[in-house]
Amino acid sequence: MSHSHTAPLKRLAVLSVHTSPLAPLGSRYAGGMNVYLRELILELDRRGIQVDAFTRGVHQPPFTALPMGQRSQVIYVDMGPGKGLSTDELVSRLPRFSAQVLEHVQRTGADYDALFSHYWLSGLAGLCLRGELGRPLYHMFHTLGRVKNLALPPTASPDERASPRRIAAEQAIVLEVDGLVASTEQEKRELLTLYQADPAKIAVIPPGVNTAQFHPTDPVQARDRLGLPRSWRIALFVGRIQQIKGIDVLLFAFDRLRRHSEAPEDLHLLCLGGDKPGSPRMSPEQRRLMELASRLDLEDSVHFLGAKDQASLLDFYNAADVVVLPSRAESFGLVALEAMACGTPVVASRTGGLPSIVSDGVNGFLCPVGDEECLATQMGRILGNPELREWLGENALERARRQSWPRVSNCIVRLLSGELLADQRRSPAPRDEPCVSRD
Ligand code: UDP
């Protein structure tokens, strides 16, 4: 049953079952989606829309509400005990999640104009709640199980793979929801070809970047603040430490770059995300990568620094000469946009959303997935040529500024109030022209 209709958006329920919009970033389950939700909720709130974001609480008493902005809140729902449960383990507890959201609605009289769910788990809860509340459900996957599995090497552990249960759930969500947000034309194609989605239900709306938070600053001062030597030539990786991010390929590329360099001692690679070395919580993937770095004799030049508070990333992006994203798959790649908003060029693999932000030879470079030689060459070009770096960086800045949150949220509001898909049905958006670039 479809609940699509056009109605002004005043009150919105966001569903984010397994991870909170307020979670600390860089750990296994907190990355781009958390940032996306936080920024979107704050922006909608600034526009006068009241958002209730429901998420699983572990330490908080049930229905604890933390304010966001002027009128919005994150509401913690009790799904039973257990820290660090996998998303598959949480499925059986979804009825409990939905029942509590309904309890909140009944108790407070909250009347939502629409539901907006994120990631497949929340999509399942959304389908149940849509039936109960009779309001349209919009969904954003952030990552798709089938795409992830196609991108992982055959050796990937079952832990890294998307389960059949997840894929079946994604399929059901695609068929049932009122509207889907794809971050890129590429994701739209994946929804069409791998999940047989109805094109009339898909809006392509890329995420935004907070340009007040990420902007160019003096790189020398940024290094001084971080205690990084001025003489270093710095490549930077930022993200969750997972196999899908391709950090192993980056280590091989960096090794190659050093072997071909006249001053290898100046070359340094910083990896932000995961845990500090030595921490007992360190994931097997991070252990594997650190072992690889030491096998390649890179212990003095590759620095695993653990996850950093997002506020401190401004200095890291500005201190770096180049940011490298060697992902095997990447639904969007917020880190690329953040680095570019600081005027730092990006070398990225040509996958997922990355080519929609990085233009090869214009504001950075693109390499085929897994191509360590290309990564080494393009990092080397930027690190060895400050003028090229500056020129690419200026173009990167210009590109990132086109994707600020106020512009992106215009599209989201149009979608959630039913306008965007109705307009699209009347005059289909030209290919490769997502909502934001028409504003
Ligand atoms: N991030 C952070 N600290 C870290 C690592 C990552 O704040 O140590 C943030 C980063 O700023 C970005 C997000 O986490 O906004 C990662 O998003 P991205 O889309 O690049 O990757 P995802 O996690 O969605 O795969």
Image: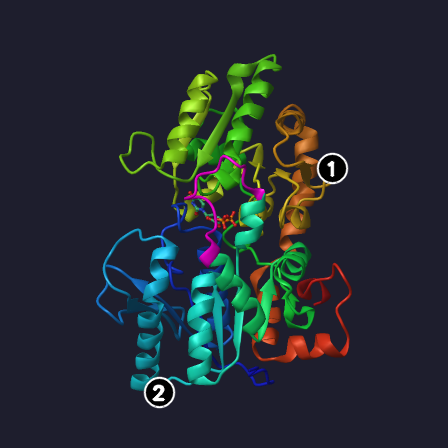
Residue bearing the label numbered 1:
361
Which mark is on residue 438?
none
Residue bounds of the magenta highlight: 151-165
Q: Give the SS element for disc 1.
A: loop
Residue at the (37%, 34%) spot, across then down: 284
Residue identified by numbered label 2: 109
- Is 156 part of what is drawn in magenta? yes
In the figure, residue 176 lies in which quadrant? bottom right
Residue 127 against residue 184 in the figure, above or below? below
What's the residue type where badge 2 is placed?
Gly
Point out residue 191 in the picture as x, y percentages from the top left corner: 63, 60
Which residue is depicted at the point 54% across and 46% down? 149
Q: Quadrant of the N terminus?
A: bottom right
In the image, residue 332 lies at what x, y percent? 58, 51
Q: Main secondary structure of the magenta part?
A: loop
Q: In this rendering, would 75 be left or right of 356?
A: left
